[in-house]
């Protein structure tokens, strides 16, 4: 997807502050952080929204969640707590249509979210 921002980051056409990479996943700091830790955990394969997932993606999505937890542990925020969010489509405020798991932590958070 040549016009997808996160595909371009994955291809290194656009710079990002990368915190983790393997064959399937790239994690990088959000450019507009909403918490002391705000990392986006992204599959390298383009998937627009959670609505496009199928059963074959279970391993991939599980890997995103486990990676977010591992980064939280590395940052020392696992025990205190952190938030993980997938925004999907308009009502959730999704702006980049390549799925990404937000990892937010390092401060207290309210519930419900806005
Ligand atoms: P969402 O609103 O869930 O689609 O989240 C998209 C996120 O991507 C937002 O938190 C943006 O701040 C973030 N973002 C947009 N452009 C970049 C970029 N070039 N590098 C890192 N994060 C970005
Ligand atoms: Zn993409």
Image (cartoon, rainbow, N blue to C red):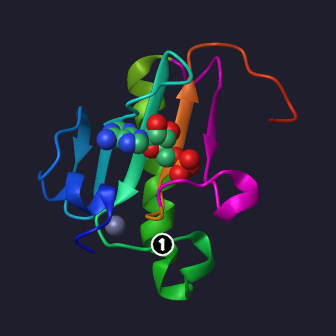
Q: Range of the magenta residues?
A: 77-96
Q: Is residue 110 above or below residue 20?
A: above
Is residue 105 something one can see in this rendering?
yes
Badge 1 element: loop
The answer to whether mark 1 is within 8 Å of ligand 2 is yes
Q: Position of residue 18 (x, y in %)?
A: 23, 37
Q: Is residue 85 magenta?
A: yes
Q: Position of residue 109 (x, y in %)?
A: 74, 21
Quarter of the image where ligand 1 sits = top left
Q: Is residue 85 above or below residue 82?
A: below
* Residue in the picture at 49% in, 65% down: 61
* Residue in the picture at 22% in, 37% down: 16
Query: Which residue has dot 1 on it?
Result: 48
* Residue in the picture at 53% in, 42% down: 102
Q: Quadrant of the C terminus?
A: top right
Locate residue 30 relative to residue 65 in the image: left or right. left
- Quick one: 55 or 100, which is closer to the camera? 100
List the single residue furthest toward the bottom. 55
* Residue in the picture at 52% in, 75% down: 58
Q: Position of residue 85 (x, y in %)?
A: 63, 46
Q: Quadrant of the N terminus?
A: bottom left
Q: How many marks?
A: 1
Q: Position of residue 11 (x, y in %)?
A: 14, 59
Q: Is residue 57 magenta?
A: no
- Figure quadrant of residue 113: top right
């Amino acid at each position: 997807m040549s016009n997808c921002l996160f595909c371009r980051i994955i291809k290194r056409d656009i710079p990002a502050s990368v915190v983790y990479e393997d064959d399937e996943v790239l994690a990088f700091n959000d450019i507009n952080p909403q918490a002391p830790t705000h990392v986006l955990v992204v599959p390298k394969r383009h998937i627009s929204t959670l609505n496009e997932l199928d059963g074959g993606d279970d391993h991939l999505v599980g890997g995103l969640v486990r990676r977010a937890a591992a980064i939280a542990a590395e940052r020392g925020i696992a025990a205190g707590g952190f938030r993980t969010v997938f925004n999907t489509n308009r009502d959730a405020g999704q702006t980049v249509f390549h799925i990404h798991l937000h990892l937010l932590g390092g401060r207290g958070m309210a519930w419900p979210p806005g």
